[in-house]
Image (cartoon, coloured by chain):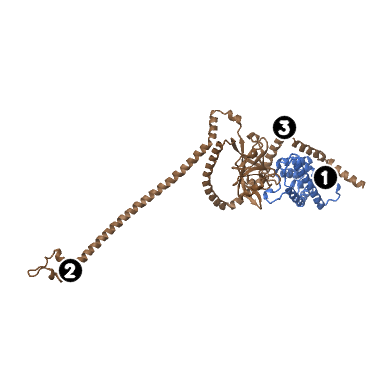
Chain colours: A brown, B blue
């Protein structure tokens, strides 16, 4: 019994303390060191944060380089898949483009109107800029859904900066280094976003499910019935974590469990937009020309509206031109038809004339025929009362076949 | 069978291969997640560390393993030191098993490995949940644990070939 316990102690001691010729540190030292680092990482000292930033910078860049072969393979595979479905995608894209073009103008009008209305109600609006950032590390870990972007505190990125894919919300920055930042995606279990769901204007909080979607939580029971399948969820701006009115995704009713299917595909992110706030001091220090530019930006709704009107004008002039062209075409067709009608009328006249001449000839012929038979009855002689040859009375007499009017 | 001249540069790189692969796998988070198989993930560094610590491979420096852990924390976004702690604990358990075992057996090592990774994942989950208030899906940990356990046998067979090539 005692010997087995001794063996156990010896094995433990050996495992913890024994250093082979190549090992510089014993495992016990390293365990204590790692516990010490865990403890330090929990503290918010400036030196530790700076040190962590430096390590992060180096590791992210190295990770990006190391991931190049793997990313190359993945991209090649996805490109092959893309080529195989190229034609079908092209056809569907064409259809989509047509419908989107028509929607775009109405959307721009709505946006400008929305901005105007916000101005009217003096809503708080960020004066912000969007900067493009490249995703340098995206390993799609099952535990934490985060990405690393190549913009950091140098580019005015702060903790909480909203990150977008086109105009859709992707997540927010949780860790900032000098030239890189970590973005917590909306699908992460630790991500919670206050949203409004339309139609119905239902207020809720969505929490990532650790996969590719989010679940609607923290909603009053009596409002659950107001949520419809395929309703749109956009940020409500509650808590000032996210700007209001950013589209997030569509509601998917899965067996009375309301999930949000995000508009953006987080696995496909290569470039994202980071919305940085403008530095007020730098705006104050700008010279007049810059101030004019800023004023130009502030009057952007009017500019947008003007652009839209110009666009509409352009469309109207294009349609007008089309109508003019059609008009000319119709005019030429009309003149051609008139000419044809005239020609036809002339033809008809000629034919009528011919017909009438023919009728006259027929009458003459019948008169002559009757004249041969009845001339003796109608002709005036020395012994007989009648009519002089060639007079209309004579002709009438012949046509009556020599009978008197009373007969 | 691969044979090397012992003073060759390629041979030197070959002897450092486990550490190089460990660093690549932590930098690249080598877990085949991009295959998009639901729930599929495994912890390759655990397999690598356990195997080489068990075999007492002289080029497998514990300090480098510790640094690999720090890098893994930075890449994944965990609090610094968590992975280092886990990797060193794997080394300790492997070292203990090596010391108490007279006749090594792959299946025994395999089940011991399951016990070790289950324990470490539990400690990890507890630390992150209790001290750092991380919201984590325990299912992912269980599945990751299971696949890491399953992949130990094929990985150890491959690594046996590697060690055989070195010793020859």
Corner quadrant of residue A365? bottom left
Query: Tag on residue A400?
Result: 2
Residue holding disc 1:
B95
Q: CA distance from mark 3 to mark 2?
A: 139 Å
Front: mark 3 or 2: 2
Q: CA distance from mark 1 to mark 2?
A: 150 Å
Q: Chain of mark 1?
A: B
Secondary-structure class at tag 1:
helix
Query: Tag on residue A46?
Result: 3
Label 2 packing within 10 angstroms: few (<14), some (14-19), many (20+): some
* Residue drawn at (81%, 49%) of the image: B112
Residue B11 seen in this snapshot: no
Secondary-structure class at tag 2:
loop
* Residue drawn at (70%, 39%) of the image: A59
Q: Is residue A382 above or below residue B34?
A: below
Do the residues marked 1 and 3 share a common chain? Answer: no
x, y percent for residue B127: 77, 42
x, y percent for residue A125: 59, 36
Secondary-structure class at tag 3:
helix
Count of numbered circles on the image: 3
Q: Chain of mark 3?
A: A
In the drawing, does residue A359 fall left or right of residue B31? left
Q: Earlier in the sequence, mark 3 or mark 2?
A: 3
Q: Chain of mark 2?
A: A
Label 1 packing within 10 angstroms: few (<14), some (14-19), many (20+): many
In the drawing, does residue A358 fall left or right of residue B92? left
Q: Is residue B38 above or below residue A150?
A: below
Do the residues marked 3 and 2 share a common chain? Answer: yes
Of B24 and A285, the residue lying toward us: A285
């Amino acid at each position: 019994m005692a010997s087995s316990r001794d063996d156990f102690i010896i094995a433990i001691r050996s495992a913890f303390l024994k250093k082979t010729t190549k090992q510089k540190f014993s495992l016990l030292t390293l365990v204590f060191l790692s516990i010490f680092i865990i403890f330090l990482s929990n503290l918010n000292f400036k030196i530790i944060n700076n040190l962590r930033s430096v390590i992060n910078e180096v590791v992210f860049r190295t990770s990006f380089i190391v991931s190049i072969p793997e990313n190359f393979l993945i991209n090649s595979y996805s490109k092959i898949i893309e080529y195989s479905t190229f034609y079908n995608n092209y056809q569907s894209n064409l259809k989509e483009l047509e419908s989107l073009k028509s929607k775009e103008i109405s959307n721009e009008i709505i946006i400008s109107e929305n901005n105007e209305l916000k101005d009217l109600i003096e809503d708080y609006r960020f004066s912000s800029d969007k900067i493009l950032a490249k995703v340098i590390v995206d390993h799609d870990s099952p535990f934490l859904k985060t990405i690393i972007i190549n913009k950091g505190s140098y580019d005015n990125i702060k903790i909480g900066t909203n990150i977008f894919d086109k105009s859709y919300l992707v997540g927010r920055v949780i860790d900032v280094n000098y030239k890189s930042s970590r973005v917590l995606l909306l699908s992460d279990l630790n991500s919670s976003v206050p949203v409004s769901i339309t139609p119905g204007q239902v207020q809720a909080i969505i929490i990532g499910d650790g996969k590719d979607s989010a679940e609607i939580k923290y909603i009053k029971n009596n409002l659950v019935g107001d949520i419809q399948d395929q309703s749109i969820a956009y940020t409500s701006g509650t808590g000032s974590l996210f700007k209001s009115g950013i589209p997030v995704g569509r509601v998917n009713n899965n067996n009375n469990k309301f999930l949000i299917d995000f508009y953006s595909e987080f696995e496909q992110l290569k470039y994202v937009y980071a919305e940085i706030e403008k530095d007020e001091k730098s705006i104050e220090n700008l010279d007049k020309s810059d101030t004019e530019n800023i004023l130009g930006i502030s009057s952007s709704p009017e500019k947008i509206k003007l652009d839209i009107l110009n666009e509409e004008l352009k469309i109207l002039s294009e349609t007008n031109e089309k109508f003019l062209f059609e008009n000319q075409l119709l005019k030429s067709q009309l003149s051609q038809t008139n000419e044809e009608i005239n020609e036809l009328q002339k033809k008809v006249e000629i034919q009528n004339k011919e017909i009438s001449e023919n009728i006259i000839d027929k009458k003459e012929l019948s008169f002559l025929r009757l004249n041969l038979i009845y001339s003796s009855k109608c002709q005036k002689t020395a012994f007989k009362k009648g009519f002089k040859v060639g007079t209309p009375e004579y002709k009438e007499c012949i046509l009556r076949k020599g009978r008197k009017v009373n007969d | 069978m691969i044979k090397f001249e012992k003073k060759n540069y390629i041979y030197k790189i070959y002897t450092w291969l486990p550490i190089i692969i460990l660093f690549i796998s932590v930098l690249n988070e080598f877990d085949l997640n991009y295959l998009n198989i639901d729930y599929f993930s495994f912890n390759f560094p655990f397999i690598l560390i356990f195997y080489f610590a068990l075999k007492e491979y002289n080029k497998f420096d514990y300090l480098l393993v510790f640094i690999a852990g720090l890098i893994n924390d930075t890449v994944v976004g965990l609090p610094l030191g968590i992975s280092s702690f886990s990797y060193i604990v794997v080394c300790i358990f492997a070292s203990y098993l090596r010391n108490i075992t007279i006749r090594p057996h792959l299946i025994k090592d395999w089940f011991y490995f399951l016990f070790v990774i289950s324990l470490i994942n539990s400690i990890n989950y507890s630390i992150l949940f209790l001290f750092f208030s991380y919201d984590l899906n325990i299912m992912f940990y269980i599945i990751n644990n299971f696949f890491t356990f399953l992949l130990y046998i094929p990985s150890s067979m491959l690594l046996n070939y590697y060690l055989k090539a070195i010793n020859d």
